[in-house]
Image: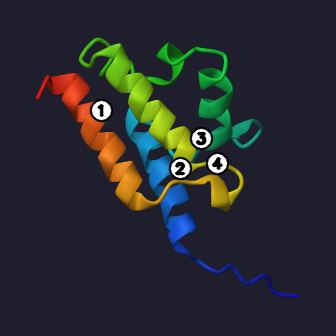
Amino acid sequence: YSEISILTKNSDVYSFGVVLFELMSSKGAIFGSLEQHFHIVEWATSKIVRGDIESIIDPRIKGQHKMNYMWKVADIALACTARRSIERPNMYNVLKDLNEAMEMETGY
């Protein structure tokens, strides 16, 4: 049997959330070894819900951004990658939230 995937605006939003996690962590969507690999959404979500954002931030950018900015971006990525597509924001709201995050970061 063949599986057919239908791409929608909600799947685009999910993909965007994956990219946000990739940018924060410098890890690929799936990373690790053949024996033990991780999907970035599951990995990042498990850390964030425990309040551990530090361990998902790429060490090369740690300290370069305000933590409230990093939390805001993580919250946006979490919303974008919600399991149920109906719970994901639309891109207009994602952009609005990212602009708010930038204002936190830059003060503008």
Near mark 2 (Cα within 10 A), the count class, few <14, some 14-19 or many ≥20, is many
CB within 8 Å, label 2 to label 4? yes
User: Residue shown at 78%/82% (left/top)?
Assistant: 3
Under mark 2, the amino acid is Cys
Task: In the displayed orientation, state which residue is furthest to the top.
Answer: 63
In the picture of the structure, the residue carrying the numbered disc 3 is: 40
Mark 4 and mark 3: Cα distance apart in space: 13 Å
Question: Dot 2: what SS?
Answer: helix
Quadrant containing the C terminus in the rendered view: top left
* Image position, residue 22 (x, y; %): 45, 41
* Image position, residue 78 (x, y; %): 56, 39
In the picture of the structure, the residue carrying the numbered disc 2 is: 80
Mark 2 and mark 4: Cα distance apart in space: 6 Å
User: Residue shown at 57%/54% (left/top)?
Assistant: 88
In the picture of the structure, the residue carrying the numbered disc 1 is: 101
Q: In the rendered structure, which disc, 2 or 1, sits on the residue that comes first in sequence?
A: 2
Q: Which mark is residue 82?
A: 4
Mark 2 and mark 1: Cα distance apart in space: 15 Å
Under mark 1, the amino acid is Ala
Mark 1 and mark 4: Cα distance apart in space: 19 Å
Near mark 3 (Cα within 10 A), the count class, few <14, some 14-19 or many ≥20, is many
Q: In the rendered structure, which disc, 2 or 3, sits on the residue that comes first in sequence?
A: 3
* Image position, residue 34 (x, y; %): 72, 43
Q: Vertical placement of 8 versus 56: above or below?
A: below
